[in-house]
């Protein structure tokens, strides 16, 4: 995302997810990891979760324009491509416009809440906590291991998201983020008479 937003979780959330206090070296890098984890989560969710302002060019579908960010705080302007004001009414994140259904409008609006959803906050904190709690062998880049001592053997494979100890979305994290995506709506077909 081009804009800069505050992280979705804090170092205190990471401590709670980790179940122990952060070491001095972990404390130094936690803010950068929180920023990266937050951006990865936002990209997967296609939402920012925090207050912001955006101007977007959106297509009208059946007299409606759906704004991707919720909650919508204020719609500042709605104009057509020529810059003329377009009348509208707002319900939640849907603008109803009195304009051609095949046209585009430019919408300048403010959105977001100061309260981050608990699922987003805990998922981002757990993404960062995992980087501190991952096996040393996986952190070093090992993908699998095999040990033998007499008649005993131990072996294993590390998850792809754990290798290297970097901040990544696990499949469960991606599913949590995708649960926040705006719903996909069917397309509206507009037939014009001659």
Image: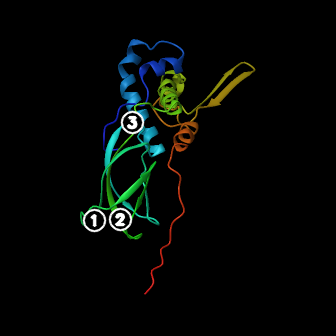
Please identify the quadrant where the C terminus is shown: bottom left
Residue at the (47%, 12%) spot, across then down: 21
Instruction: Identify the residue under disc 1.
Output: 81
122 w.r.t. 96: above or below: above
Residue placed under numbered mark 2 in the picture = 104
Residue at the far left: name it: 83
Which quadrant would the N terminus be assigned to in this image? top left
Element at label 1? loop
- Please rate how many residues cluster around mark 1, counting C-alpha atoms within 10 Å: few if below 14, some from 14 to 19, many from 20: few
- Is label 1 in contact with label 2 (beta carbons under 8 Å)? yes
Q: Which mark is residue 50?
A: 3
Q: Is residue 87 left or right of residue 123?
A: left
Decide: is 58 above or below 103: above
Give the SS element for disc 2. Answer: strand
Circle 3: element type: loop
Distance from Cα at disc 1 to Cα at disc 3: 28 Å
Number of labelled discs? 3
């Amino acid at each position: 995302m081009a804009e800069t937003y505050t992280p979705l979780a804090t170092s205190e959330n990471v401590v709670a997810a980790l179940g122990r206090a952060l070491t001095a070296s972990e404390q130094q890098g936690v803010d950068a990891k929180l920023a990266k984890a937050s951006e990865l989560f936002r990209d997967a969710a296609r939402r920012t979760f925090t207050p912001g302002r955006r101007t977007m060019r959106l297509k009208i579908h059946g007299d409606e324009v759906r704004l991707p960010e919720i909650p919508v705080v204020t719609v500042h302007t709605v104009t057509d491509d020529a810059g003329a004001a377009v009348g509208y009414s707002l319900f939640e994140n849907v603008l109803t416009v009195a304009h051609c259904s095949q046209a585009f409008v430019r919408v300048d609006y403010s959105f977001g809440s100061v309260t981050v959803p608990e699922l987003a906050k805990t998922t981002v904190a757990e993404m960062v906590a995992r980087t501190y709690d991952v096996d040393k062998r996986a952190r070093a880049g090992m993908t699998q291991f095999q040990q033998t001592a007499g008649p005993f053997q131990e072996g294993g494979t590390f998850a792809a998201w754990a290798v290297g100890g970097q901040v990544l979305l696990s499949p469960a994290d991606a599913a949590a983020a995708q649960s926040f995506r705006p719903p996909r709506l069917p397309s509206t077909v507009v037939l014009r008479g001659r």
